[in-house]
Image: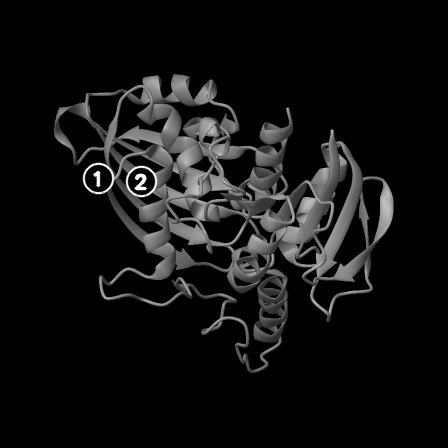
Amino acid sequence: MTRHLAVVGTTGAVGREICALISERKVPAERISLWASQRSAGQRLAVGGCNSPVGQLCEKSFEGVDYAIFSAGSERSRQFAPLAVRAGATVIDNSSAFRMDPGVPLVIPEINPKDAHTHQGIIANPNCSTIIMNMAVWPLHKVNPVKRIVVSTYQAASGAGAAAMEELRTQTADHLAGRKITPKVFPHPIAFNLFSHDSPVGQTGYNTEEQKMIDETRKIFHEPDLAISTTCIRVPIMRAHSASINLTFEHPILPEQVHDLLKQAPGVEVVDDPASGGFPMPLDATGRDECLVGRIRQDAGQPGGRGIELFVCGDQLRKGAALNAIQILELLTQ
């Protein structure tokens, strides 16, 4: 039983999903405190069977708190997470603020649950695309080490928050009505368009999102030299990210073996029926806890049967963010 649970950033897209999951999964807590910015304070949200008020986040928000789930962005996490730890709370942080800190475990419960117990007050939730990709890759890597990953993502508007989702709605209506589209959240029109992920491109040529997937996967897998190449694309999908993944294994592996391994993997559902057109789609993944995996086939371009291609879809707001954080909380309080 968690005596006092705090949720920071409750009125954002991920924060609202966290509140819904607390109720849905019946997370045991004697008290739940909801915190947000001054702009959002005063709202009320349904959580844990109660209609609870949202307070304004401040330095004293964590007095008596046992666990705090943060989903308010990196700046807020850097400012308030250390205060929460000093007040005695364990922080589960959804932002990128602490992910690559050597002293902070980066955890996907289905992959590296033991790392969660090495924390020094803060546990980081990985990037949404990192989580969704590796739900499909890790079960295979455990059995036959993956030597190289080449991945292209198709990332939904939900990854940029509630305002971005609304921008996709309004731009779609404007485009169909022949009205001029003026992007506000995204740098380019998102309706009927796609573009390189809206994060800065570094000196390596990779944007921040792509670099996150590389660095975070290596940390989670404890494989600092794992070869990974990433391309992240924003697409006009409301919710649920997708990824096309090409894997090179240490030893030959057959698609049938991949099917069998993934069917047994927790948090994964194999959707792969070419004869009837069954394969993972964002619409089917939306609202689901499981990541959907399909299009499993031998890579014709790799000799010796060591290459596999597959496609995965996962709900960015659930397993890609809120659900993973709740699962970490459950892991700590079992």
**Residue 223, picture quadrant:** top left
Which numbered marker is on residue 92?
none
- Measured along the vertical axis of the image, is residue 260 above or below residue 65? above
Q: What residue appears at the point 61 percent right and 75 percent down from the top-left corner?
A: 174
Q: Does dot 2 land on a helix, a strand or a loop?
A: helix
Mark 2: give few (<14), some (14-19) or many (20+) Cα within 10 Å: some
- The span from disc 2 to disc 1 (Cα, nearest Å) is 7 Å
Mark 1: give few (<14), some (14-19) or many (20+) Cα within 10 Å: few
Q: Which residue is mark 1?
A: 225
Q: Amino acid at mark 1?
A: Asp
Can residue 284 be seen here? The reply is no
Going by the image, does 279 lie left or right of 67? Answer: left
Residue 237 image offset from top left, x and y in percent: 53, 55
Choose between 305 and 12: the one closer to the eye.
12
Choose between 242 and 199: the one closer to the eye.
199
Q: What residue appears at the point 57 percent right and 44 percent down from the top-left corner?
A: 92
Image quadrant where one finds the C terminus: top right
- Measured along the vertical axis of the image, is residue 197 above or below residue 317? below
Q: Verify CB contact (< 8 Å) between mark 2 and mark 1.
A: yes
Q: What residue appears at the point 63 percent right and 47 percent down from the top-left corner?
A: 69
Q: Amino acid at mark 2?
A: Arg
Q: Which residue is mark 2?
A: 218
Going by the image, does 104 lie left or right of 4? Answer: left
Q: How many marks?
A: 2
Q: What residue appears at the point 58 percent right and 41 percent down from the top-left corner?
A: 325
Residue 191 image offset from top left, x and y in percent: 52, 67
